[in-house]
Image (cartoon, helix red, strand yellow):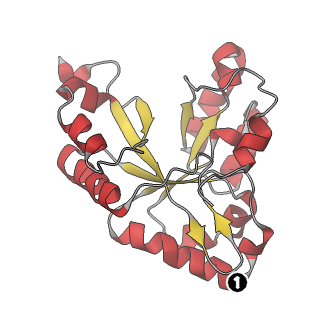
Amino acid sequence: DMKKHMYNKKFSTAHWDSAVDDNLFFECFKNSSQQYRKEIYDIYFGATFINDEISYGNTMGVNASEAQYKNLLKIQEKYGVPISLTFNEMNRPLELLKEKNIKEFISFIKKYYKDGVRSCTISHTHLMRTGALQAAFPDMDWKNTVNHQVTSTQGFIDYVKLGYTTIQLDRDFNRNLAELKRVKPEANRLNVKTCLLIKEACMPECPFKTEHDCWQSGK
């Protein structure tokens, strides 16, 4: 029974479309199997906030173009697959905590929120701690980034207390089932979701990862 398939709504996938044709990702998704589409929990896409003193965006530096973004909205509306705005760059500007910049950043996100985007990955823990984003967008699902490298139950709880509603666990949990079993009841108690990285191109314990996560090539 396709409705009860064990992999339904299990995988968060990247919008990675650097092709000249803005419709490539949309056409591939549209023409994929129905079961494949049912297995996608959400599609995350990059954007970059820029003003006169800040550039803050996604680690990979590949942002969805306006046409690609419109196609993502079509996917969300037609297939019921949520799309997720992503700011996971680990170079998190202190200037973003200025009142003026917080207001401008909120205005930047508001465009997506008005369009129906209800999921956002954000790496800036100090900004999350202010509560300004949660107050401005009460229905947003706030994800931390796997680049935070949450590897323990205590770390999981700490990120929940910052205001995140979905905690992305470090891939270390793939090899630490005992700790994963401790996280699960805490997630239930705190009424938050968890997700776990199952695939990436980086080597385990890659010596370049920290710098890579801070270099945002879209600047």
Which residue in the rendered view is the most extreme toward the right?
Answer: 207
Quadrant in the rendering for residue 188: top right
The answer to whether residue 4 is above or below residue 68 is above
Label 1 sits on residue: 99
Residue 72 x %, y %:
31, 52
Foreground pick, 122 / 18? 18
Residue at x 70%, y 66% (from the top left corner):
127
Residue at x 72%, y 63% (from the top left corner):
129
- On screen, residue 153 versus residue 143, left or right, reads right
Q: Find numbered disc 1 in the image and state the secondary structure of the residue it sits on.
A: helix
> How many marks can you see?
1
The answer to whether residue 157 is above or below residue 101 is above
Residue 20 x %, y %:
34, 48
Residue 29 x %, y %:
25, 36
Residue at x 27%, y 42% (from the top left corner):
24
- On screen, residue 115 versus residue 119, left or right, reads left
| Quarter occupied by the N terminus | top left
Residue at x 74%, y 80% (from the top left corner):
98
- On screen, residue 18 versus residue 106, left or right, reads left
Which residue in the rendered view is the most extreme toward the front?
Answer: 20
- On screen, residue 177 versus residue 10, left or right, reads right
| Quarter occupied by the C terminus | bottom right
The answer to whether residue 101 is above or below residue 121 is below
Quadrant in the rendering for residue 148: top right
The answer to whether residue 36 is above or below residue 86 is above
Within 10 Å of the Cα at label 1, are there few (<14), some (14-19), or many (20+) other Cα atoms? few
Q: Amino acid at mark 1?
A: Glu
Residue 159 x %, y %:
70, 48
